[in-house]
């Protein structure tokens, strides 16, 4: 099966599951409160096939990118009979809960997926339990100013002797906003020497989750050069000629063994052209790439090249349910924060709307996840998509769940219904804006494929 077909099929299956869960949330709570559900549809447009049970037509429709639950008396402008089983006949608090149920179902799905994954197949990178050896250390970072260098082995970090990186991370989180004694071993002219220093753990998150990378203390995640899993079309790495399967030996003369090290090198050179030494199936290549400023994929801004790294060496653990639940909560909390941060940056124009992906981008990601070994890439991606769907639908935009909830809250505050004609106009304008937004995102998806440039003679 070609990658394109794999990507399309996997996207339809993944989005189908996400939409089914989302709409089932609305459906279940609506039925619980006695609202008559007329249509439960996966997809939009013309009905392809389905069946009717009770008052509800369960159907699969022509356009598979979405779905809806049609409740009696729900649509503005629709004729109402005043029957008690109509949506508008129920108290506003019940209608708010029905609106919340879809996004909440997506959040629950993301939590359950990751909990199950951590219980069955938790991939832990090997470097966490190995000796704490440093990768590239930015000179202008707290770690650099403390005298730490690339290749140092930490033999003491505060009270811990010969710590692993996992121990360093845990101890650093306890010691934030304080100076800790650090001892490292360093090889100089073939001789192992010991250096003592003080490292100040400045907490730039102001009470958030402290990360040692924020002070320039970058772990060496592997001994081999950083592998390239795939290259994002149209990005600097693609334009420079980097390809999937390559290994980046160095950037600007500095060996790199993690994405964090790549980002740090690019930041230190302030976006100047990066000179890459790349190993391609035993052949050494010299490539030059012009970094661009953008999101690194986690909501943090910086200079980047636009490629996904190959997975670092890891081992598999099966966590007990309590630890799996805790890890799932952390995963979903952190990624929800990243999503909200990206949305905030888009609104405040601190991020580029061209970073958004639509069906083509989702298809590419699901296709890559399916072809990667193991279940972890696909399950993690499904959780991220489910979180995105839940958060997006809570945005206070009419037509979306968040918009409906906002109007209900306004009506509850005013203690009266808003003018029906006014609500119809609001929904019509919102519908047009969403269509234009969807068209832009899809155009952006196509533009990333660089089709036009490939057609040039």
Image (spheres, grey):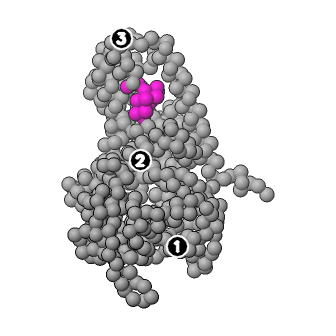
Tag 3 or tag 2, which sits nearer the N-term?
2
Q: CA distance from mark 1 to mark 2?
A: 29 Å
Does the image show residue 421?
Answer: yes
Tag in front: 1 or 2: 1
Residue pointed to by mark 3? 416
Percent from the top left, x then y, of residue 148? 40, 72
Above or below, comparing residue 364 to residue 351 in the picture: below
For image coordinates 35% across by 67% down, the residue present is: 125
Tag 2 or tag 1, which sits nearer the N-term?
1
Dividing the image into 4 quarters, which one contains the C terminus?
bottom right
Q: Residue furthest right?
A: 457
Above or below, comparing residue 372 to residue 419 in the picture: below
Percent from the top left, x then y, of residue 115? 28, 53
Left or right side of 64 for 321: left
Between 376 and 158, the one nearer to me in the picture? 158
Give the class, few, some or many, for how many residues have Cα within 10 Å of label 3's Cα (few <14, many ≥20). Answer: few
Left or right side of 346 for 334: left
Between 40 and 403, the one nearer to me in the picture? 403
Is-magenta flag for residue 430?
no
Residue pointed to by mark 2? 338
Residue pointed to by mark 1? 254
User: From which residue to which does the magenta span run?
Assistant: 393-405
């Amino acid at each position: 099966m070609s990658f394109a077909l794999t990507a399309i099929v996997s996207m339809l299956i993944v989005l189908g599951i996400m939409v089914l869960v989302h709409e089932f949330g609305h459906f279940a709570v609506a039925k619980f409160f006695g609202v008559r559900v007329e249509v439960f549809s996966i997809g939009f447009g013309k009905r392809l096939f389905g069946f009717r049970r009770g008052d509800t037509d369960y159907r699969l429709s022509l356009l598979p990118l979405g779905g809806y639950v049609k409740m009696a008396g729900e649509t503005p402008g629709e004729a109402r009979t005043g029957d008690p089983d109509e949506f508008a006949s129920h108290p506003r608090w019940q209608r708010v809960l029905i609106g919340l149920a879809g996004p909440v179902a997506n959040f629950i799905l993301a939590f359950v997926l990751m909990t199950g994954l951590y219980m069955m197949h938790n991939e832990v990178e090997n470097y966490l339990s190995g000796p704490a050896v440093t990768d590239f250390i930015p000179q202008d970072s707290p770690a650099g100013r403390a005298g730490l260098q690339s290749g140092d082995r930490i033999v003491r970090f505060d009270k811990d002797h010969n710590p692993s990186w996992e121990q360093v991370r845990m101890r650093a989180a306890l010691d934030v906003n304080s100076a800790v004694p650090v001892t490292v071993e360093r090889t100089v002219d073939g001789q192992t020497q010991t250096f003592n220093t003080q490292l100040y753990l400045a907490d730039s998150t102001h009470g958030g989750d402290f990360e040692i990378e924020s002070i320039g203390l970058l772990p060496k995640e592997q001994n081999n050069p950083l592998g390239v899993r795939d290259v994002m079309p149209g990005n600097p790495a693609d334009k420079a000629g980097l390809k999937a399967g390559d290994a980046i030996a160095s950037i600007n003369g500095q060996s790199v063994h993690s994405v964090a090290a790549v980002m740090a090198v690019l930041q230190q050179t302030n976006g100047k052209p990066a000179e890459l030494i790349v190993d391609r199936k035993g052949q050494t290549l010299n490539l030059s790439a012009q970094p661009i400023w953008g999101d690194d994929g986690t909501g943090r801004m910086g200079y980047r090249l636009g490629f996904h790294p190959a997975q670092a060496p890891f081992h598999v653990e099966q966590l007990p349910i309590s630890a799996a639940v805790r890890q799932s909560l952390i995963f979903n909390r952190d990624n929800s924060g990243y999503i909200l941060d990206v949305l905030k940056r888009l609104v405040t124009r601190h991020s580029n709307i061209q970073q958004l992906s639509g069906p083509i981008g989702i298809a590419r990601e699901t296709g890559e996840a399916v072809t990667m070994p193991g279940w972890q890439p696909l399950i993690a991606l499904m959780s991220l998509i489910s979180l995105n769907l839940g958060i997006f639908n809570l945005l206070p935009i009419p037509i979306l769940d968040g918009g409906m909830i906002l109007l209900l809250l306004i009506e509850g505050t005013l203690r009266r219904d808003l003018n029906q004609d006014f609500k119809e106009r609001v929904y019509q304008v919102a519908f047009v804006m969403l269509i234009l937004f969807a068209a832009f995102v899809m155009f952006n998806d196509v533009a990333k494929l660089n089709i036009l440039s490939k057609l040039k003679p």
